[in-house]
Each structure stands twice: as structure tokens, then as C-alpha cells.
Image: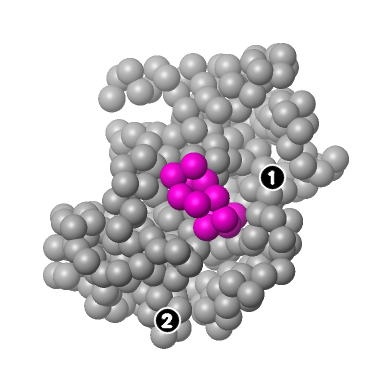
Amino acid sequence: MRILVLGAGGIGGYFGGRLVEKGEDVTFLVRSKRKQQLEKNGLIIRSVNGDFTCTPKLVTKTDVAGPFDLVLFSTKSYHLEEAIEDLQPFVGGETVILPLLNGIAHVSQLKQAFDGDKVIGGLCFIETTLNETGDVIQTSPADRLVYGELEHPDTKRIREIADAFSGTKADFVLSDHIEQDLWHKYLFITVLSGVTTLMRAPIGPIRESEGGRNFIRQMFEEGAQIMRAAGAPIQNNIVDQHMKTIDQIGYDMKSSMQRDMEKGSSIEGDHLQGYLLQLADQFHVDAPLLKVVYQNLKVYEKMV
């Protein structure tokens, strides 16, 4: 199976690198600056689950490489339209596209840009970043990528993908209810990124401050209410499940959006909190906490 990884940042670099480590045929679609960096230094993963270095196969959007069997679509939402355009020459009639973006709004956008049947569901749980030299840094044990068909769960192509993903050092999990998984992750990341950026702190100090857990829970309840009104397939006890996860994650855990803000980088506020607020308006659900979180993000965007 020929696999194309769109981007070689924290997510694409990590999961793509683990597939290279296993021996899969992986190529990274990158921009010229990143290509030069990777050609000079190699793809370097520094991880609590084991380091890995390789000389990766690289292409840019102007290269001719033919269609690929599978695309790991790992980009930020604010680069989505540009990434779709860059990807077009590498997508053939049988190409499968596995997006790993946060949120949910991108799924319909990808289906519109490509044949809807090409797109399957995907998400990941991992804390990674690139350091100043472009190395992929992963400091917490979680490195789970969940994927699955959005319609008929058991297909020939999903079994072939599962075979390619098996035997790696990362945790690739095939799901037969990926749409629900996507909404559950969307709720979790929207609240986690919302509270950590609002408080400018890792989850530990927020969680252990007076009223902190209650504030986090209220955010989950508010988001879940919006999603239920929109008909999302979330479980009845999802807030309790997410609160258990909040209690278990490390004291110093930061959301990727918080790390982006600390760097003065672009953020995904419109794709995450903004889209959920659109659903709240559409289905007439009051969301005062989410509005405060979103306003904080818009102020940040005004200042950078």
C-alpha cells in the first residue's frame, strides 16, 4: 500500500514515521522549507515510546508521484482549503482519505472536495510538537489513532488499511462507530482547548483550583447539550466519561491550541468553538460559557 502523509509536523511526522519504522511505503507531502529541513536532518522522532530517525521519501505539490492508495490528511483547519488543492494531483480513483483534524466540520468539506466515498473517519489522541530544529517531540505515552468507515464498517479497503497499520509502535485502532468517536473527541478537545486557553494554564492547575472541576464539567454539559440538539450520536454518559479522562491526564497537560497561542501562532477557534456556536445558534441552545471562551480566542487573534 502506497501511503501519502500530508504534512510532516507533530501528527503527520509521528504517525507517518511509525509506519516508516514498521516498513510501510510512506511518502510525505511537504512544503519546500520543510523538505529542505528533512533532507538535511532526516525525520527525527523523540518519544517516550521510543526514538526513531529515518531519511523520509518526500514530495512537494509540484512533483509528479502518481495516485496513492491512502492519504493521512494531517493539517490544521486554517490550512484546509490550501491542503485540499495541494492534494488533488495525488488522489486517484481508488485513493482513500483519512483526515486527522480536530473537530467535525472538515468531514463534509472533504467530501465535497473529493468523491464522498473516498473519505473515511479518523482522529488521534497525542501530545506532540516540533522543536526549533524540526524534530517531532512526544512527551506523554498516548499515541492513539482511531479510524473507520463512515458508512459500512466492514469493507475490503478498511481491512487492507488495518493490515498496513498493524504491528507499529503507535496505537492504531479500527472503530466500527467512528462517527460517534469523532463527536466525542470534538466535545473533549473543544472543552480542553477552551479552558486551557481561557485560563492560560495546563489542565492540572485548572482542575485543582477552587471550582475548577465544576467549571470544566459545566463546559462539557453545555457542549453536549448543543450536540444532542444537533442530532449528534453521543452517548448519554459522555460527560462522566470525559470528566474521568480529565482527572486522569497529567497535571502539566496543555492543549495544542494553548501551545499554539504561546508561540503566537494561528489557532483553530473558528473550526472548534466557532462551529459549535453556530450549531448552538441554529438549534437555539444557550451557550454562555462557550461564548466567553470563543470571545477570548477572537481577542487573541486580534492581537497576533
Q: Which mark is residue 24?
A: 2
The x and y percentages for residue 33 are: 16, 55
Residue annotated with mark 1: 184
Magenta region includes residue 2: no
Q: Residues within 10 Å of mark 1 (few under 14, many from 20)?
A: many
The x and y percentages for residue 214 are: 73, 29
SS at badge 2: loop
Is residue 101 in view from this perspective?
no
Which of discs 2 and 1 lies nearer the camera? The answer is 2
Q: Residues within 10 Å of mark 2 (few under 14, many from 20)?
A: some
The x and y percentages for residue 149 are: 65, 60
Identify which residue is drawn at 24% across, 78% down: 55
The x and y percentages for residue 82 are: 31, 42
> Which color scheme is applied?
one colour
Depth check, front residue: 223 or 81: 81
Depth check, front residue: 90 or 215: 90
Q: Choose top left, top right, bottom left or bottom right for residue 177.
A: bottom right
Q: Residue furthest right?
A: 236
Q: Choose top left, top right, bottom left or bottom right for residue 293.
A: top right
Identify which residue is drawn at 40% across, 75% down: 2
Identity of the amino acid at label 2?
Glu
Identity of the amino acid at label 1?
His
Lateral position of residue 2 relative to residue 239, left or right: left
Lateral position of residue 267 relative to residue 56, left or right: right
Q: Which residues make up the magenta segment? A: 110-122
Q: Which mark is residue 233?
A: none
